[in-house]
Image (tube, rainbow, N blue to C red):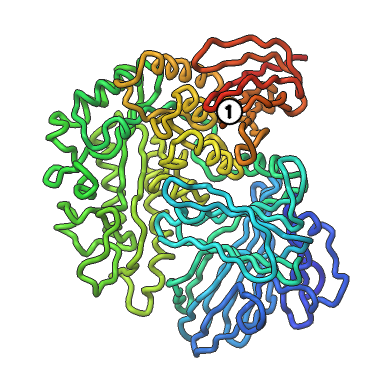
Amino acid sequence: MTGEIRIVAGSTGWAWGVDDRGELRQLAMGPAAASATVDAPLVLYPRAIPTFGTEPHRRTALRVTHHDGTRSTRLAVDEVTRRDTAEGEELRIALVDPQFGLTVELVTETWLDDDVAAQWVEISNHEDGPVTVWECASSAPLLAGPGPTWTHLGGGWADEWAPTNEPLSNGVKVVESTGGIRPHLQHMPALLVSPDGGWTETTGTVLAGQLAWTGNTCFEAEVRDGRSLRLLCGASLRASELVVEPGDTLVTPQMLWAWSTAGLGPLSRRLHRWTARHRVRDPGRDRVIVANNWEATFFDFDEARLTALVDDAAELGAELFLLDDGWFGTSHPRDDDTAGLGDWSVDARKLPDGLTPVIERALGHGLRFGLWVEPEMVNPDSALYAEHPDWVVGDPARPEPNLERNQLALDLLRPEVRAFVVDTIDTILADHPGISYLKWDANRALVETGSATLDAAHQGRVLFDLVEATWSVMGDVAERHPDIEMMLCASGGGRVDLGALRWFHEVWTSDNTDPFTRIRMQWCASWFLPALVLGAHVTRWGEAPVAFSAAVAMSARFGWDLDTSAATADERAVLRRAATLYRRIRPVVQHGELHRLVSPLEGPRAALMYRDPASGAAVVFGYQLDDDTTGADLDLPPGRWTATSTSLDGDPVDLGPVSGTALPWPLTRRGTAVIWELVPTT
């Protein structure tokens, strides 16, 4: 097979050639893929899938042990197939190791309108015995340019979306996340790469990648000669050797890619459109203003305390009341995080008449009602664990599995456990038809990762297979309850991946709601995710003024998590004003295009703009992060508007006509904010 093979979605694409030995060689990635040709002997081009045994001095994308113990793999192109999809095309390049009958398909799918592509690998075992996969990248592109850099985003509880920008010198850099259930608390499953080392919001070459995987992830960057950059991106298989039986196929997670030569701003807007259209439930539905009780009560509440918070939520302008952790557990009451998980019956000591009176109180005010669940988990101090101690993830030979946060993870590889979790949600919603929202949490990692469902030879599959099992449960719940909105949470921002997001409406960005930190978090999260899915609440974290905290939260999906009974009259007035304003600007914030204007990573102020591409209406948020009197006028994208300026602790001010370079910056004092509403003029 000769000639070029290419697939292109605007500026995002690949071109390959096949050398005389049948090996697949990458000619180009990015805009050059559309016109790339073979200009040198193909053997000089990099392998598209470098395998163990063929790349003695470089990292490999695929390493397997064949059924007879052979560890090297030699792949040759066997077949190339294409098919049209609803919004692009799918290209499959089948490669085989002819000596063993192992088939490796490199699959690429494009979405033409968004200039986005996904890539993954499917390994089919046609050998005479089992094959063990030790390493397998979903995508392994090679880039070239002077001074390559990348930006990866750290995690850690309350420190999600922390960016690290670093040049890539000769050698190998590895960014890996483990923990199975919520690995993104180590590193977010996303990265930015620049082959020439420089980009801004509006200039430069930048490649964005996201791994759609609710499990362990690994990004590797290998540089040679100071300019040749190989990326290896996929699921981390550390402690997860995958035995593939004859006749079976292993499918790796999708790696999503998008390329820009005009900076990060237009790239983010494309990713936001794609995510809303293909990875979020009900993208056209406005997300509601949520009042959560957690930081007001923690586990300590009763019906009177909750109904008082419900009354406050309605009076202050919320649209949904969310009852968080602590509402369940009868024989093992949930008074703290040591007991009750798995026993999803209402705690009659706290709520003797059940949830119904609180739900009816909310509905009577015109509020919707939401509930917190953590259905994948169990406390050893629970009736469920007493009855089914074998239902948990852990090494079968260890009688006492390790705890984290006093809990264990249920083994969703067991069909009966998956059925239990789905039936639990079914029962909760059937018993309480007034519930229309669920906050789905997950608060521990996986350390000992065994399952009694697998024999000794296949125990390495637990972490990998649990992802698909978890998705199966999430998918079943979403399919059975299409009208229930769901938030994806995991110790804060531990699950923000495009794999699980398919069955949810939003994510909880972080438990850290200090507004000064949250500006940075939401800024970096917005590189990849639209405001529509980023939950943001006003709390007492950071002890900032409520007006400032509210202005920060209003630039995403707005809500609050406050003891409103202890709020001052002025603070209550701020929340009331914020809820009223948010309802007015919500369509533009949640569904408009984002323009990041002034970065909180670089100076004493920050600003961002949401714009409705159809009407031209816009909302601009301005934040003062430190005392500073030198702020210049704010430059906006081209346009002409009539502007209204609102500070949440004051009255709106009509500013009259403004243009793209004439928005005065009024803030000088730390912890102040302003929101501009811009109405286009002709």
Residue 521 is left or right of residue 325, and the answer is: right
On screen, residue 298 versus residue 599, left or right, reads: left
Q: Horizontal and vertical percent for residue 631? A: 68, 26
Residue to which mark 1 is pinned: 627
Is residue 553 visible in the rendered image? The answer is yes
Q: Is residue 51 above or below residue 383?
A: below
**Residue 414 relative to residue 220: left or right:** left
Under mark 1, the amino acid is Asp
Is residue 277 among what the camera can see?
A: no
Q: Nearer the viewer, residue 356 or 570?
A: 570
Image height of 47 relative to 580, above or below: below
Return the x and y of residue 526 as percentages of the image width and height: 58, 40
In the picture as drawn, the residue positioned furthest to the right comes out as 39
Question: What residue lies at 53% left-to-right and 80% top-to-bottom?
Answer: 64
Considering the image in quadrants, where does the N terminus appear? bottom right
Query: Which percent across, then down, holds residue 618?
Result: 65, 23
Residue at x 19% of width, y 41% of height: 335
Towards the viewer: 568 or 36: 568
